[in-house]
Amino acid sequence: MATRRKTAAGRARASGGRPARGKRNQGRRTRGKLAPGGETRGLTAAEVALGVEDPQVATLAAWVRQAGGTPVGAYRDPLGGRPLLLASLPLAAVQPTPFQRDLSPTHTQRLAARIAEAGAFLDPLIVVRGEDGKLWTPNGRHRLAAAKVLGLRQVTALISPDEALCYRILALNTEKAHNLRDRSLEVIRMARSLAQKDKRSSEASRAAEFESPELLTLGAAYQRSGRFAGAAYDPFLKKVDRFSDRPLATSLRQREDHAARLLDIDAQVKRIVEALQSRGFRSPYLRNYVVARINPVRFHKARKDGEPPMPLAQALTRMLAAARAFELDSVSHAQLAWVAVGAAAAE
């Protein structure tokens, strides 16, 4: 089978075309596309070189000096060719973007200890000029906090003129793995910020920054309830949630409505779980089992055109109705045992 696929792809290339792809993949933005074979790209060593006094980084250097820092070096990004400035900045001059995930004190202390053990602050912060004229880092909140714990006066930073990096948090962050709650909250915060900054921007036009449409709905739900168990609803939302082409201000109002309805469903799920527990059912997968049982698209396969099996609003209506009509007597210990076996196999 692998040989046939390779041959088909080869025939397509030989005829000047490309291997056929489903419509679902058409029109997607390609990020980090790998170069075929041994093909090379980007700048040469001579093209990368750039002096601190070069006019291309003069504005960046002025920002640094105005903030009380010192330009250290400059270069052109070897991939995109954009000028970048390496600098030392006062710790107080840099702030995390206001829509980043919440700070983890435990991770901050752990990171500070590791930096102290290394005896060097080795990973420069990515820094851009924010909307308020301040210097923002989209991916260094915990390193910034760790530097404060260590009492550093200065931190090294890579200054970029690209303000859009403020909204590339999920792609840039390398400090601490994002869990679903972190990702969802960051995405909804970014969306709210962009809705004020760019009135014409839509969810679809920001797909690269938001990554997945369900993160917007989950983020709105997490903002309403910090204890919301979003992971249980993620598989359901992946099947029915899609980016909107309408302005963000409009689509966010609809997200709020969807989030409220999702929390109504979750309240019913909690009621069902508590009733099952009172009947002696004990399983860490009890909530997931109930959510799967009331999922109206549980057995729907993904469509090749990428369209959802039904609109999100309709799916939420059916899910709430199924939760209200849930029959406790239909649950058996054997069913829960199979759920546990399936979860263990997936892990």
Image (cartoon, rainbow, N blue to C red):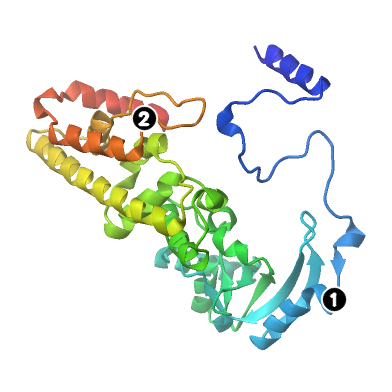
Amino acid type, callout 1: Asp
Indicate which label's residue lies in the foreground, 2 or 1: 1
For the C terminus, which image quadrant?
Answer: top left
Q: Is residue 102 among the parts visible in the rendering?
A: yes
Figure check: 321 above or below 79: above
Q: Would you say 180 lies left or right of 284 here?
A: right
Q: Would you say 10 lies left or right of 185 here?
A: right
Measured from the top left, where is residue 206 in percent x and y? Answer: 54, 52
Q: Which residue is mark 2?
A: 344
Amino acid type, callout 2: Ala
Q: Would you say 102 lies left or right of 33 here?
A: left
Figure check: 108 above or below 339: below
State the image quarter where residue 84 is shown: bottom right
Residue drawn 54% across the image and 68% down it = 143
Relative to the observer, which residue lies in front, 292 or 197? 197
Residue drawn 35% across the image and 30% down it = 343
Measured from the top left, where is residue 133 in percent x and y? Answer: 58, 80
Residue drawn 65% across the image and 45% down it = 31
Give the label on residue 33, or none.
Answer: none
Q: Residues within 10 Å of mark 2 (few under 14, many from 20)?
A: few
Figure check: 108 above or below 271: below
Measured from the top left, where is residue 5 in percent x and y? Answer: 68, 16
For the N terminus, which image quadrant?
Answer: top right
Q: Which residue is mark 1?
A: 54
Q: Which structural element holds mark 2?
A: helix
Q: Residues within 10 Å of mark 1 (few under 14, many from 20)?
A: few
